[in-house]
Image (tube, helix red, strand yellow):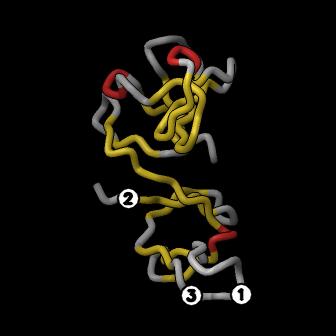
Amino acid sequence: MKPKYKAFHKKEKKIVPVDAIDFLNNSTKGNDGDCYGAVINNYFVPIDDIVLLRLTGRYDKNGVEIQEGHTLLTPFNNFGWNVKFGEFFYQEAHSSMIGFYIECSVTNRVLPLTDFERHEIVGEWLE
């Protein structure tokens, strides 16, 4: 599966679609292979001005695609759960995992992103 992205534009304080990601140009920043920027609405935006957000390919109970940066309401409780991607420690399995996960903004509990069709997107934790 080819990953899809959106971006949180730090200056505009909003989520925007990403047309392309540039990994090669602008060699003044970082080592070769680093991500240098993204093309958003036909304009190059430096990587320092955005936060890349992965789309999960999974949909909430209303049919909206869940992405990194969303806040979900789950059937577990009435707290907000933030969608993230990366390495996390899953307490119930006693192991580290890599992938999409949700983190409770109140209890800091971390769970893999499962049963997503029962969750509902209620906001963006970056905005």
Residue 30 in picture, x, y percent from top left: 70, 77
Judging by the rendered image, the residue that carries numbered circle 1 is 28
Helix, strand or loop under label 1 = loop
Report the residue at 35% width, 22% height from top: 115
Q: CA distance from mark 1 to mark 3?
A: 9 Å
Q: Residues within 10 Å of mark 3 (few under 14, many from 20)?
A: few
Q: Residue 71 lies in what quarter of the image?
A: top right
Helix, strand or loop under label 3 = loop
Any mark on residue 4, and which? 2
**Circle nearer the viewer, 2 or 3:** 3
Residue 117 in picture, x, y percent from top left: 31, 26
Q: Amino acid at mark 3?
A: Asn
Q: Is residue 106 left or right of residue 88?
A: right
Q: Amino acid at mark 2?
A: Lys
Report the residue at 28% width, 36% height from top: 63
Residue 41 vertical placement versus 108 (above, below): below
Q: Earlier in the sequence, mark 2 or mark 1?
A: 2
Helix, strand or loop under label 2 = loop
**Circle nearer the viewer, 2 or 1:** 1
Question: Farthest residue toward the front?
Answer: 95
Q: Earlier in the sequence, mark 2 or mark 3?
A: 2
Judging by the rendered image, the residue that carries numbered circle 3 is 25
